[in-house]
Image (cartoon, rainbow, N blue to C red):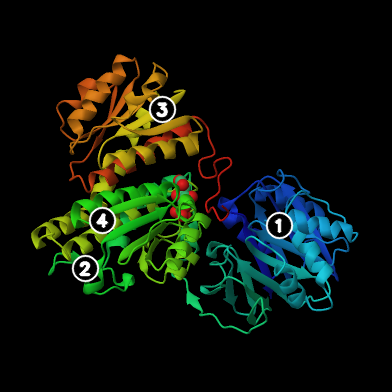
Amino acid sequence: MCGIVGYIGKRRAMDPLIEGLRRLEYRGYDSAGLALLQDGSIEVVKAVGKVSSLQEAVAAHWPDEATSKVGIAHTRWATHGPPTVANAHPHVDGDRRFALVHNGIIENYLALKTQLQRRGRTFYSDTDTEVLVQLIASCYEGDLVQATAAALKQVEGTFGIAVLCRDEPDHLVVARRGSPIVLGLGRDETIVASDVSALVAYTNQVIYLDDDDIAVITANNVELRTIDNVPVSREVAHIDWDTTAAEKSGYEHFMLKEICEQPTAIANSIRGRLDDTLGTAILSGLDLSQHDLALINRVVIAACGTSLHAGMMGEYFLEDLADIPTEVEQAAEFRYRNPIIGPNNLILAVSQSGETADTLAAVREAKYKGGLVASICNVVGSTIARETGRGVYLHAGPEIGVASTKAFTCQVTVLLMLALRLGRTRRLSREMGLELIEELRRLPDMVRTVTERAPAIEQAAKRFHDAQGMFFIGRGYLYPVALEGALKLKEISYIHAEGYHAAELKHGPIALLDEHVPVVALANDVPGRSKVIGNMQECRARHAPVIATATDGDPDVAQHADEVIWIPRASRFVAPVLTVVALQLFAYYFARERGCAIDQPRNLAKSVTVE
Ligand code: F6R
């Protein structure tokens, strides 16, 4: 969840470190810091708040600019201890011989800390991370990589780390277990980061570390070994997006940019994957033969948050189009519930980042139980994508806004293509396949029609922006959309918003309705519409204002609603995507009207790499 950057090479390290932190700020951002090896000593500067606060502190610390060419930096999302300067990274040992940045959680840190304190070491922060640097210091006998390996062997938990040693100024040591580390290989420079977005400005040649890898990094070389000192080599991968993909490009917020990018993102998810001859989808990354696909008798989808909602859409698609029993599991529960995985069960991990700790744990459990495991990820080369070894990439481009938008619609698009593919190995006719292909091809333009309606949605959001809470209700395919609409609103506007099945409302939550709690009712012209109209009337009878989504030209919905958001006519498979885009815009304008920090909502981080 925290962001890590390390640099060694030909430039002033300060520049790529600060630039990298700025690009990682979306991952976690309550404090930041950096350490440079300057004139034979380690100097550390930290600040609470955003990277801009760190920049000010750096300017004050080095008025003449630091010339060091090696350093490490960090942006923190607090786990152990509040966001203070003392708790910000990098952490150093008592002699300032070592500095370390860390992403992850050291689970046995209290036991280790007690041992180290008994041996006379003094601690200066509340963090689990400080234990690591003190442990490395206590293991050091003149070789940083050996000391790091020896320390990491004593550690339980997860880490992605970068370590600097005053006595070994020609290299950095990095390691990972459970938290991502990627090495960018430039010309006469090497950049370390927890996320490629921090290094694409310098190179597109990268190496992803595997768990328990340790790397010794110089400006021109990367030497890899395992924690047990066995030399290993890892593939060099090529990143196919550049810095402009991670810029706001004139939009006020990344979230708005990413909402508006959805027509292109969906077109990229679909490109080259539709087959008009057979009326099917081609998902070659699944690497499963027609025979293997035909044998699949159950699908279990594991995911978190927005990706979980996409997974719920997948359940409807797979049961409706492919007749395959499908379950959706909160990834956090998967391994603790002792899931039953049988022969020919496909376990599908859905994750934008490909780094979510719970989803990764579900993948490992499913693999251990002998399941056929595949993933739907956006980030190429991410841990989940690599560990599953088969799957479908979204090709949505980098998603920077913490509130996931384009990844969701692309996940749903990919799940629809998967259902089409699996359906065609079963009873789904070629004609029906061709109809779906036609709809998928029209989807980007239909989404564009929704984004072009932003001004009307903005007006609706402004009208209700002082609501005290909000419910989102839907049925069938629009039920997961109700959950997602509520999640979007609560995470960026901080008002209490709940998504409910429209029929469930009267089993309890209806007690909360009054004139200050509007209900967003998804009443598009898809199966369930007339029942949702009935539910809208129940809400209005309790004085709750109703904001409805309705299909263009619907003659009935408007008379039962206080506000209508119009959605282009589409089948039940595609209407949810269009509706969610409208709800993303609604949440965006609602939060903007309330003056909230849209791209970096409080307490949230983009990639949840701890349990
Ligand atoms: C909400 C959001 C989160 C993520 C969740 C899973 O807008 O972004 O709920 O969907 O943390 O993340 P990934 O998809 O990266 O596994």
Q: Position of residue 282 (x, y in %)?
A: 24, 69
Q: Secondary structure at mark 3?
A: strand
> Which secondary structure, mark 2?
helix
Marks 3 and 2 in Cβ contact (< 8 Å):
no
Asked whether residue 272 appears in the rendered view, the answer is yes
| Circle 2 residue | 294
Q: Cβ of disc 4 within 8 Å of ligand 1?
A: no
Q: Amino acid at mark 4?
A: Leu
Where residue 154 appears, x then y in whole percent?
72, 67
Tell me the mark number nearer the camera, choosing from 3 and 2: 2
Query: Distance from label 4 to label 2 (Cα)?
Result: 17 Å
Q: Is residue 286 left or right of residue 295?
A: right
Image quadrant where one finds the N terminus: bottom right
Mark 3 and mark 4 lie on one chain; the one further toward the N terminus is 4
- Badge 4 element: helix
Distance between mark 3 and mark 2 Cα atoms:
43 Å
* Circles 3 and 1: CB atoms closer than 8 Å: no
x and y, in percent, of residue 388 in the image: 42, 68
- Label 1 belongs to which residue? 108
**Residue 283 at x, y percent in the picture:** 28, 68
Q: Considering only order in the chain, which callout, 2 or 3, is on the residue closer to the N terminus?
A: 2
- Cβ of mark 2 under 8 Å from ligand 1: the answer is no
| CB of mark 1 near ligand 1 (< 8 Å) | no
